[in-house]
Image (tube, rainbow, N blue to C red):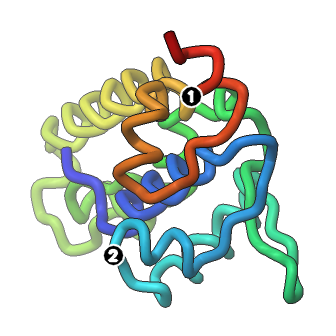
Amino acid sequence: MRLTVYSDYALRLMMYLGLRKGGSLSTIDDVAAAYHISRAHLMKITHELGQKGLIETIRGRQGGMRLAREASAIRVGDIVRACEPDFALVPCMEPDGGKGCVVLPACVLKRALATAAAAFLEVLDGYTLADLVGPAIALRQLLGIENSGALESAMKP
């Protein structure tokens, strides 16, 4: 299984937002700088994740984005499904049904790949965004996010 770059960036964006404390807002520029990825790609991803109800976006000078729900309520599989709704591993799994494939009427491969894709997403459903950002202190440091908040205070010896 291979995720698209689009899904990879969406997962990174969601992880970044999951690391922010108290629902504080982040900007596309913040995320792009932290991961060294394209601002243009992040704009498209932000729009789609907002449309799908995974993030909340606030327009304006003081605007930004944040998670629409707690990180513990967002399954990783849901993020991937939002970005790859058909999750077509081969052309015959695409919405048009793989027109032109001569073996499609007798093909078992399509069913096997569909089963594999479902199993892949089922495993991802076993993880939440909170699981991905579990090592919060290290991730915040690597991404340049300020280490303030109750979690860090509680974890200090």
Query: Local crowd at mark 2 within 10 Å, few (<14), some, or many (≥20)?
Result: few
Marks 2,1: beta carbons within 8 A:
no
Q: Secondary structure at mark 1?
A: helix
Q: Nearer the viewer, residue 13 or 48?
A: 13
- Quadrant of the rendered image containing residue 45: bottom right
Residue at the front extreme?
157
Residue at x 74% of width, y 65% of height: 65
**Where's residue 39, x and y in %?**
48, 85
Name the residue located 33 percent from the left edge and 75 percent from the top edge.
36
Q: Is residue 54 left or right of residue 10?
A: right
In the image, residue 43 above or below residue 146: below
Who is closer to the viewer here, 52 or 46? 46
Q: Which residue is disc 1 drawn over? A: 130
Which type of secondary structure does the marked residue at label 2 adopt?
loop
Judging by the rendered image, the residue that carries numbered circle 2 is 36
Residue 101, can we see it? Answer: yes
